[in-house]
């Protein structure tokens, strides 16, 4: 037990370094890969060259039947909503502790996002609340695997089967993760990954901008192709559905193909994916286990069939004021930060029901048309959300913090972080004064 004076009261901070990461991005390899593409003049195109190579490699890595790349994760998600048949007047259930990019594709197809609450243990979509929100208009459920923590896929797929509703997995943060020993994207209906930003702080596979969609469902794959891969090499021959075979090379006119030099960079990032994921998960687990005996704090949990987490945008730690006699969240956070811990928050990143358009509605297409206005296309009038609609998410938002995870931290860093939290817990009575 640490008896040392807390840093907020003048003691020596428990964590002495603010740059503990030793892993280095393979910048030169990325530059070379992109430059090779540029030299070859491979700056556009789909269904051939580096784009096809990357799709084949990713499909094989995941163990999915089909893989399609897109220009962004969000356009991949849009193609997935199109694939599963989302259209005007439908509803798509998505957690409020989510992200606009997870469902904007459905919104712009005329579907209404219907928010649900989260599980307070995992901070992920709550399957019980999903069931409460299902109506005859529900066409899809969006399962966001936030920061690489995996949603309860067994429950969600059961619900999907029971109600005839597709599960669209937003795996923007979850490349290489598993559920019950199977890679995310290798089972279920359709999974979408983002390639946004650069390693190590960007998406687990990072290429600047880009997206990937995997599915085992041939019809979904063909609908995605038709939706957004204008002029993809061989697309019309690839279709098995006779209706899509009749399309001309411009398909349905949308062009959301990936940029080949970006995919060349993504291929480099793939080489270190498992190493980076393992490092981050080990770091997160070390801290999670160490904090088990520290009052007042816990690391966001995971379901038994998947132990990943902290793969993008850090790990989530939750303050439990009841365990420290109600010490305020501000005092607790100030004391932890003073110990040198890179703790930011509180907040769950985004709370979708607090958006202006979700509280007040919005005349999306003018002339009082669209899913966020008056009665339209079989949808009842949009009532708008308000504070108090999602008690669990709102509570967790007020006391959940973000901490970075490291792939290859300097020795002892995770232990120093645990010491910092312990020191704060040990001295909480003096912190309240
Ligand atoms: C949870 C989530 N879903 C979807 C997206 C959209 O991905 P992209 O930025 O590649 O369009 C992101 C991007 O940050 C995200 O974090």
Image: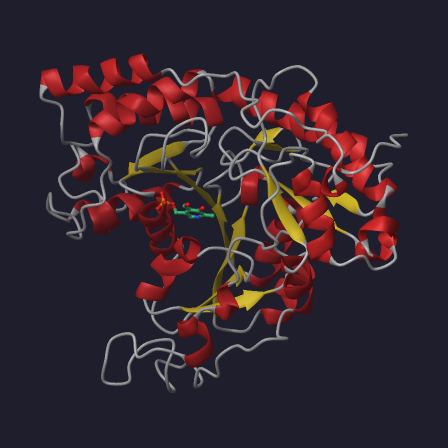
Residue at screen point 16% across, 44% down = 230
Is 71 left or right of 192, judged from the image as shown?
A: left
Residue at screen point 50% across, 17% down = 23
- In this view of the protein, can residue 319 be seen by the observer? yes
Q: Please say if 241 is above or below 5.
A: below
Residue 176, percent across and down?
52, 28
Q: Please say if 329 is above or below 146.
A: below
Q: How many marks?
A: 0
Q: Nearer the viewer, residue 9 or 281?
A: 9
Q: Nearer the viewer, residue 343 or 138?
A: 343
Q: Nearer the viewer, residue 279 or 247?
A: 279
Question: Which quadrant of the rendered structure holds the N terminus?
Answer: top right
Residue 233, percent across and down?
16, 32
**Which color mode does the image show?**
secondary structure
Q: Nearer the viewer, residue 162 or 416?
A: 416
Residue 138, percent across and down?
50, 68
Is 388 left or right of 11, judged from the image as shown?
A: left
Residue at screen point 85% across, 57% down = 322
Residue 80, percent across and down?
38, 50
Is 103 left or right of 297, judged from the image as shown?
A: left
Residue at screen point 26% across, 29% down = 262
- In this view of the protein, can residue 302 be seen by the observer? no
Is 187 left or right of 222, judged from the image as shown?
A: right
Question: Which quadrant of the rendered structure holds the C terminus?
Answer: bottom right
Which of the 4 quarters of the picture holds residue 366?
bottom left
């Amino acid at each position: 037990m640490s008896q040392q004076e807390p840093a907020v009261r003048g003691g020596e901070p428990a964590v002495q370094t603010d740059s503990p990461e030793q892993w280095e991005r393979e910048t030169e390899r990325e530059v070379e890969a992109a430059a090779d593409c540029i030299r070859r003049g491979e700056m556009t195109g789909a269904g051939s060259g580096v784009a096809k190579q990357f799709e084949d490699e990713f499909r094989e890595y995941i163990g999915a039947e089909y893989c399609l790349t897109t220009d962004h994760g969000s356009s991949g998600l849009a193609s997935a909503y199109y694939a599963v048949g989302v259209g005007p007047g439908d509803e798509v259930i998505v957690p409020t502790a989510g992200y606009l990019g997870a469902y904007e594709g459905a919104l712009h197809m005329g579907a209404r996002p219907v928010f649900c609450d989260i599980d307070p243990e995992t901070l992920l979509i709550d399957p019980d609340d999903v069931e409460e929100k299902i109506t005859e208009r529900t066409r899809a459920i969006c399962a966001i695997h936030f920061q690489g923590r995996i949603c309860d896929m067994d429950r969600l797929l059961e619900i999907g089967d029971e109600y005839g509703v597709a599960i669209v997995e937003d795996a923007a943060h979850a490349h290489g993760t598993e559920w019950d020993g199977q890679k995310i994207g290798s089972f279920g209906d359709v999974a979408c990954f983002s390639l946004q930003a650069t390693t190590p702080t960007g998406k687990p596979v990072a290429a600047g901008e880009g997206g990937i969609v995997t599915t085992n469902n041939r019809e979904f794959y063909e609908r995605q192709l038709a939706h957004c891969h204008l002029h993809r090499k061989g697309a019309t021959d690839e279709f098995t559905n006779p209706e899509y075979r009749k399309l001309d090379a411009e398909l349905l006119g949308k062009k959301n193909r990936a940029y080949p030099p970006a995919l060349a960079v993504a291929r480099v990032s793939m080489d270190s994916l498992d190493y980076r994921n393992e490092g981050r998960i080990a770091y997160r687990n070390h801290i999670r286990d160490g904090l088990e005996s520290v009052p007042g704090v816990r690391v966001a949990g995971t379901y038994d069939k998947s132990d990943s987490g902290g793969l993008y945008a850090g790990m989530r730690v939750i303050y439990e004021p009841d365990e420290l006699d109600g010490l305020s969240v501000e005092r607790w956070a100030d004391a932890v930060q003073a110990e040198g811990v890179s703790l930011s928050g509180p907040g769950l990143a985004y709370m979708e029901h607090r958006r202006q358009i979700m509280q007040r509605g919005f005349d999306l297409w003018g002339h009082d048309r669209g899913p966020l206005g008056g009665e339209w296309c079989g949808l009842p009038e949009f009532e708008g959300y308000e504070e108090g609609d999602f008690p669990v998410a709102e509570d967790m938002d007020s006391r959940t913090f973000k901490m970075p995870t490291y792939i290859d931290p300097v020795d002892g860093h995770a232990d120093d972080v645990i010491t910092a939290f312990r020191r704060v817990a040990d001295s909480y009575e003096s912190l309240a004064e």
